[in-house]
Image (cartoon, grey):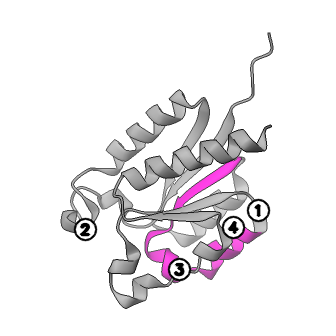
Amino acid sequence: MKKSKKNKVLVIHGPNLHLLGKREPDIYGGYTLSQINKELKARAKKSNISIKIFQSNSEGEIVEEITNTQYDFLIINPAAYTHTSVAIRDALLGVDRPAIEVHLSNIYKREDFRKKSLISDVVLGVISGFGKTSYLLALEAAAGVLRNKSR
């Protein structure tokens, strides 16, 4: 029997997310990025999805990852670049692959400058405000989109 090809999901964590657990736990929660990644890997395994996880504080490195990595679906938390990065937006448009924007906090309940996303209108959807569960919901949504695509 032929083994089915695993779909590849790329998860990108933007700037300062390596500080989770230390940085503003009242906003971002007390869990670490390592704990989020561990849960994502376990959930991906259950869904028969291959997952690659990448974190960078550098806009250029994030653009390189978006444009040079092979994947079927992108989950991205652009963090502060959500509000400023035309380069990340253009990279998403350039690769034309399905993507979901994720945020731990509800950006619409925060400072005015955080309420504007340069990314949200070029992705399939946005999941915001559910802490680490935002990532898990995004992975579930990605799995559903990929399942429907393969039918």
Residue reaching furthest to the top: 1
**Residues at discs 1 and 4 in contact (Cβ within 8 Å):** yes
How many numbered marks are there?
4
Element on which disc 3 rests: loop
Q: Residue at x 51, y 75 (%)?
A: 82
Identified by mark 1, the residue type is Val
| Residue 5 vertical placement versus 97 (above, below) | above
Q: Mark 2: give few (<14), some (14-19) or many (20+) Cα within 10 Å.
A: few
Query: Which tag is nearer the camera, tag 2 or tag 4?
Result: 2
Query: What is the quadrant of the N terminus in the image?
Result: top right
Residue 84 shown in magenta: yes
Instruction: Report how far apart the C-alphas of labels 3 and 4 lie in the structure.
Output: 14 Å
Instruction: Report how far apart the C-alphas of labels 2 and 3 lie in the structure.
Output: 19 Å
Q: First in sequence, mark 2 or 4: give its number.
A: 2
Give residue 109's position: percent from left, percent from top: 33, 79
Give residue 132's position: percent from left, percent from top: 36, 52
Q: Residue at x 41, y 89 (%)?
A: 113
**Stretch in magenta:** 72-93
Instruction: Report how far apart the C-alphas of labels 2 and 4 lie in the structure.
Output: 27 Å
Q: First in sequence, mark 2 or 3: give its number.
A: 2
Element on which disc 4 rests: helix
Element on which disc 2 rests: helix
Element on which disc 1 rests: helix
Identified by mark 2, the residue type is Ile
Identified by mark 4, the residue type is Leu
Q: Nearer the viewer, residue 15 or 130?
A: 130
Q: First in sequence, mark 2 or 1: give its number.
A: 2
| Residue 136 vertical placement versus 125 (above, below) | above
Q: Which residue is mark 2?
A: 27
Disc ID at residue 92: 4
Q: Which residue is mark 1?
A: 95
